Amino acid sequence: MVTVESIGELAQRTGTSRRMLRHWEELGLLAPAEVDDRTGRRRYAPAQAGRVRAIVALRSSGFGLDAIGDLLAAGLTHERLLTLLRERESELAARIAEASTALTQVRSRLRAVEEGHATTMTTTELTDLPEIRRTGVAETVTDETEIPGAVARLLTRLGVDGAALPHDVLLAYDGTTDESVITVSAALLTPEADDAGAPLAPAAAPVMLRAAEAAAVVHLPRRPASTADAWIAVDDAASARGRRTTGPYRQVLHADGTATLAAPTVPA
């Protein structure tokens, strides 16, 4: 008498599930050795565990069920085998390349965050900020993730290239007036641009920042790759000094490639 086992026993022995075995049966990947006509109960031969493990192994390698059907088919040809393996090789190579690129980006950001945080924690000063009155350009965003795009557009409206600034540029981020939006402003910091009292040109906007006491100020040797990450470091530096940053936040992009971040603070 041929020994058979239930679907539950086969699932338990192969580390799969009854549902998965039934699904594979529907796709023609696994046929029961016996099916009771009256109850519909399935019985499997012990040797079929090998086929189940083969399907599991191929799934772990990323093959789709259609490809697995071909790989396990009795009539599999050499050419079809090569095609299936080469397709999977290409898919895996593409995934590895994508993951490698992502890993490089994460490592680059990690190094920048670690270096920037160390610099900010040791060099941040608590000092006064002067009042600023300039004529510049501005737009509003509803989320911090929209700020980099807004800055790029504002620099274009100022007629400067963000990669090679001819003059220092002031950027201001103000979410204190309306908590639902952030006003992003930009203005040139040149003597001839100090004309806040003059009539505004079309699409121009006044950029006015109040003087502040005990502001957290840090001068960075190069512009941060992520300004958001840099502000997190400034917040930490202020906290270490018993202060909490508030807005509006100021950032100066210097023509020499350095940057200054400054934010008013209050006691924590």
Image (spheres, rainbow, N blue to C red):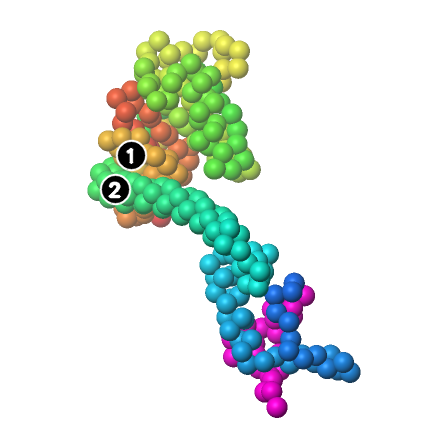
On the image, the x and y values in percent for residue 8 come to: 60, 80
Q: For this view, does 168 lie left or right of residue 187?
A: left
How dense is the environment of label 1, judged by Cα within 10 Å: few (below 14), some, or many (20 and up)? many
Quadrant where the N terminus sits is bottom right
Question: What residue is at 25 percent from the left and 37 percent from the top?
Answer: 125
Does residue 6 belong to the magenta stretch?
yes
Secondary structure of residue under mark 2: helix
What percent of the width, then of the height, locates residue 119? 23, 40
Dominant SS in magenta: helix
Are discs 2 and 1 less than 8 Å apart at CB?
A: no
Q: Which residues are magenta?
A: 1-26
Point out residue 187 in the picture as x, y percentages from the top left corner. 40, 19
Q: In the image, what residue occupies the spot 45% across and 18% down?
A: 156
For the point 33% across and 26% down, the residue is 252
Q: Amino acid at mark 2?
A: Glu
**Closest to the observer: 55 or 153?**
55
Front-most of 238 and 91? 91
Residue under numbered circle 2: 115
Residue 42 is inside the magenta segment: no
Mark linked to residue 37:
none
Residue picked out by circle 1: 217
Q: Amino acid at mark 1?
A: Val
Q: Is residue 35 visible?
A: yes
Depth check, front residue: 232 or 65: 65
* Quarter of the image where one finds residue 37: bottom right
Q: Residue furthest right?
A: 38
Q: Using residue 55 as the reference point, say whether residue 187 is left or right of it.
A: left
**SS category of the residue bearing label 1:** strand
Graded by Cα atoms within 10 Å as few (under 14), some (14 to 19) or many (20 or more), the crowding at tag 2 reads: few
